[in-house]
Image (cartoon, rainbow, N blue to C red):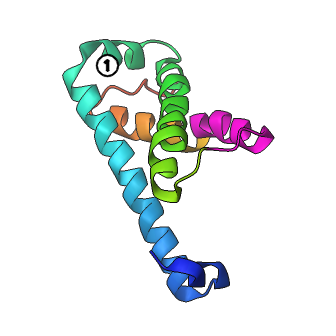
Amino acid sequence: MLGPSSFEGGARTVALGLLMHLGVAFAWSAVFLVLYERFGGIRRVVRSPGGVLKVAAVYGPIIWLVMSFLVIPSLVHRPPTLNYRWFIQLIGHIPFVALPIVYCISRAAGDAPARS
């Protein structure tokens, strides 16, 4: 979007990066909301003990796999580099991306397990 000037940084690059990240996060949240509303099995698992974490442990890696193998390569026109950082991102999407999405949506629906 910014071309070669994106490597120079600056406020414009930061603002666009934040806007894109927020857009992607909103999109993945919307996808999960639709899945949550349409599939009772997801709601049942979320209601079970440790269910939010169980669902996040599946949804987080799915998000990273789709982004890594479909979305990002279509934008940068090259395949992903599978190194240790790629695998850290794969695992990191569980607690830092999917867990907040699953917890917030289930809580808003009244399905999150109660704290004791």
Q: Toward the viewer: 90 or 3?
A: 3
Question: Horizontal and vertical percent for residue 90?
Answer: 64, 35
Residue located at (52% from left, 78% from top) = 3
- Quarter of the image holding residue 93? top right
Is residue 94 in the magenta section? yes
Residue that label 1 marks: 43
**Helix, strand or loop for the magenta stretch, by majority:** helix
Q: How many marks?
A: 1
Tell me if I can see residue 108 in this picture: no
| Amino acid type, callout 1 | Arg
Is residue 30 in the magenta section? no
Residue 72 placement, left or right of 45: right
Residue located at (39% from left, 28% from top) = 112
Q: Toward the viewer: 43 or 71?
A: 71
Residue 16 placement, left or right of 23: right
- In the image, is residue 110 above or below residue 48? below
Tell me if I can see residue 13 in this picture: yes
Residue located at (35% from left, 31% from top) = 106
The extreme front residue here reads 77
Q: Quadrant of the N terminus?
A: bottom left
Magenta residues, start to end: 80-95
Q: Toward the viewer: 79 or 8?
A: 79
The extreme left residue here reads 38
Residue located at (75% from left, 44% from top) = 85
